[in-house]
Amino acid sequence: MSERKPIRKAVFPVAGLGTRFLPATKAIPKEMLPIIDRPLIQYAVDEAREAGIEQIIFITGRGKTALIDHFDMAFELETTMRERAKDLAALEPTRIQPGNLATVRQQVPLGLGHAIWCARGIVGDEPFAILLPDELMIGAPGCMKQMVEAYHEVGGNLISVLEVPHEEVSSYGVITPGARNGALTEVLGLVEKPRIEDAPSNLIVSGRYILQPEVMRTLEGQEKGAGGEIQLTDAMARMIGAQPFHAVTFAGKRYDCGSKIGFIEATLAIALERDDLRGEVRAMATRLLAS
Ligand code: UTP
């Protein structure tokens, strides 16, 4: 048994504006866009629960109520479905025990670092997970479970990383890698959206984190960074050296569902993996590509 504090809480920043998906995201949060029949937020919450997370914390903003309704009891829907003898199994993943979902409003979307800082009161003095729902991570076990397992080995702070072509690094947080041991790489430095020529590697931070509560104090009063936003990457970079910091190379697939192409890719890839859809989708795609 590990003596490290367990990871019980996960923060889901969902207060972004989702401008790349307008007008679809004018009245609906980006995280409610469905990949087939499950909204993005559901995939992320399922991944967190698989990793043993008990408390879900949403950092929301105005117009994000649908995300909370999604995990609430839908009394009229359920009553009507029961009266009509319909199967309620599809609603099962949306059930969260009362008290296990907390929400905080970010008020103004000042950046990911600021969004995380808004959770400081609920996170308190324990290590916690962060999952960005628009990065869809598909693996068995899931990405957060792989990270929690790594955390029990090395403790400290962990981020999930993956390799991208060098010319793409400027859109992401990039690590300076140190010693490598299997899927674990020591993190010696971190930089947000570097110029291609300045990038220390092609290993990018990919939307899953386990951080020690000290990050909240580091975020306190932090200046704006790349893109005029308060960056989580900058706060994490300041913690390197003071605490262990590792990257976990995720064994699985990652889809950037914050971009249209990533979203389409995820929809197709997941449809092709599902037993109930694979055959028909493959035939349809073949037909479309031939025309
Ligand atoms: P993105 O920058 O990808 O999301 O932030 P966005 O701003 O919603 O999308 P675009 O670029 O305008 O299309 C990554 C994650 O961080 C959250 C977002 O909701 C998303 O899950 N976020 C970002 C916040 O919660 N608050 C912020 O101030 C910024």
Image: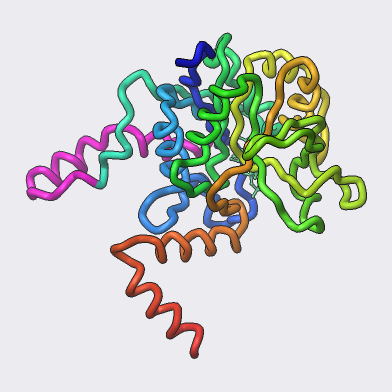
Q: Can residue 119 be seen from the camera position used here?
A: yes
The x and y percentages for residue 277 are 33, 66
Front one among 96 and 50: 50
- Magenta-highlighted residues: 61-89
Image vertical order of residue 145 relative to residue 167, above or below: above
On the image, which quarter does residue 80 sit in? top left
The x and y percentages for residue 18 are 60, 48
Image vertical order of residue 118 relative to residue 193, above or below: above
The x and y percentages for residue 200 are 85, 43
Q: Residue at x 76, y 33 (%)?
A: 179
Describe residue 282's horizontal placement relative to residue 238 as left or right: left
Describe residue 103's horizontal placement relative to residue 206 as left or right: left
The x and y percentages for residue 134 are 56, 46
Image vertical order of residue 138 relative to residue 98, above or below: below
Q: Can residue 59 be seen from the camera position used here?
A: no
Farthest residue in the bottom direction? 291
Q: Residue at x 21, y 44 (%)?
A: 89
Front one among 245 and 96: 245
Q: Quadrant of ligand 1?
A: top right
Front one among 185 and 84: 185
Describe residue 156's horizontal placement relative to residue 234 as left or right: left
Farthest residue in the right direction? 197
Image vertical order of residue 98 relative to residue 231, above or below: above
Q: Is residue 4 magenta?
A: no
Q: Quadrant of the N terminus?
A: top left
Q: Residue at x 45, y 82 (%)?
A: 286
